[in-house]
Image (spheres, rainbow, N blue to C red):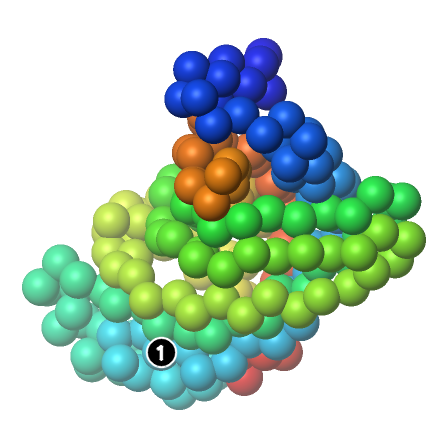
Amino acid sequence: MKYIKIIITLFFMGTLASCGVKTQVSQLEALKSCVFKVKTVDSIYLANTPIEKLYNKNGLDLSRAPSLAFSMLQQKLPLKARINLGITNPGSEDAGINAFEYIVMIADQELMKGLYNQAIKVPGNGGDVIVPFKIDTDIYPVMSKPENQKIISSFFSSSKDTTVTIIVKIKPNIIVADKKVEYPGYIDIKKVLSNKELLPYLK
């Protein structure tokens, strides 16, 4: 149904280039079958405090930085980081996406959103690319809720093997006659993330 909406929208715009649209839709479909993995995470700051200063032998300890308490009183909790995301395409068809809006959800809560303004292409048959992301967001709306604090604290505990489901909601742009046409709705990509997978990057 979503693909039909795209074709109808483009038809009435009078700019339909069916071959190019079909290729982009095919690449989007292939992208949903790709394998996503965090390659590296660095330059992580929470309330302007390097994340490694917030760790003790038991895991993440938010009480170790007075700046966090001050930020919470101001109802702000800025998070900055650089993430290199690896994407592997096991299928036979090339995968790809043009500029896209994204929303990252954790524990059914919106963690961050933004715009990635570069095209991503992943060749088929095992093609692998690394996509750099810069994060600069305020996570106070998430961390202000006690239930979310408990989930985050448990996930970043070094003594427990814990997983959490991350949902990345993507709204791509389709390029037709050099114009960007917004995709109707979002594509959801789910990733089960293990704390054992992520913790080594944060220490």
- The reply to whether residue 159 is in sight is no
- The single residue placed furthest to the left in the displayed view is 74
- The reply to whether residue 23 is in sight is yes
Circle 1 — which element?
Answer: strand
The residue indicated by pointer 1 is: 45
Residue occupying image coordinates x 55% and y 75% = 41
Residue type at numbered disc 1: Tyr
Give the x, y percent position of residue 134. 43, 69
Give the x, y percent position of residue 86. 69, 64
Please state which of residues 134 and 198 is positioned toward the viewer in this rendering: 134
Split into 4 quadrants, where in the image is the N terminus? top right
Split into 4 quadrants, where in the image is the C terminus? bottom right
Residue occupying image coordinates x 68% and y 31% = 19
In the picture provided, is 138 more to the left or to the right than 1? left
Please state which of residues 6 and 155 is positioned toward the viewer in this rendering: 6
Q: What is the tally of numbered marks visible in this picture?
A: 1
Instruction: Reply above or below: 201 against 191.
Output: below
In the picture provided, is 28 more to the left or to the right than 174? right
Instruction: Reply above or below: 93 against 8.
Output: below
Give the x, y percent position of residue 181. 43, 34
Residue occupying image coordinates x 16% and y 69% = 71
Give the x, y percent position of residue 11. 49, 17
